[in-house]
């Protein structure tokens, strides 16, 4: 559900965005917050973002946006 709905809406039109480091961090943190909710990881449990990536197999949304932007520019 995260990959099919949330990420699709989150990245809509992202090929044309100017993505700053601050915005990329905010997008990634939102994604990790959603994944923690799906995995039922609550406070005070702590888990690194890297560990969440290993568990879910989902890349950072900022990396995906950057990849899409370079593909869009190249065409």
Image (cartoon, rainbow, N blue to C red):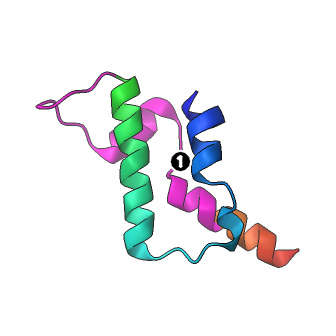
**Quadrant in which the N terminus is drawn:** top right
Q: Residue at x 69, y 72 (%)?
A: 16
Q: Quadrant of residue 2?
A: top right
Seen in the image, is 52 located left or right of residue 43?
right
Disc 1 marks which residue?
A: 59
Vertical side of 35 occupied by 31: above or below = below
Seen in the image, is 49 located left or right of residue 42?
right
* Label 1 CA crowd tier, 10 Å (few <14, some 14–19, many 20+): some
Range shown magenta = 40-66
Seen in the image, is 45 located left or right of residue 64?
left
Give coordinates of residue 70: x percent, y percent: 72, 72
Give coordinates of residue 8: x percent, y percent: 65, 44
Quick one: SS at disc 1?
loop
Q: Residue at x 44, y 56 (%)?
A: 27
The answer to if 60 sits in the magenta stretch is: yes
Q: Residue at x 16, y 30 (%)?
A: 45
The answer to if 71 sits in the magenta stretch is: no
Give coordinates of residue 65: x percent, y percent: 61, 62
Vertical side of 25 occupied by 36: above or below = above
Q: Name, please, the residue furthest toward the top.
A: 40
Give coordinates of residue 35: x percent, y percent: 41, 34
Vertical side of 72 occupied by 11: above or below = above
Along the line of sight, the residue nearer the viewer: 20 or 70: 20
Q: Name, please, the residue furthest toward the left.
A: 44
**Quadrant in which the C terminus is drawn:** bottom right
Tell me how many marks there are. 1
Q: Residue at x 31, y 21 (%)?
A: 40
């Amino acid at each position: 559900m995260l990959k099919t709905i949330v990420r699709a809406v989150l990245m809509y039109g992202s090929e044309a965005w100017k993505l700053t480091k601050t915005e990329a961090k905010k997008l990634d943190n939102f994604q990790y917050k959603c994944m923690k909710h799906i995995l039922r990881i609550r406070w005070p449990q702590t888990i690194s973002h890297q560990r969440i990536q290993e568990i879910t197999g989902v890349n950072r949304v900022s990396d995906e946006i950057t990849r899409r932007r370079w593909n869009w520019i190249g065409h």
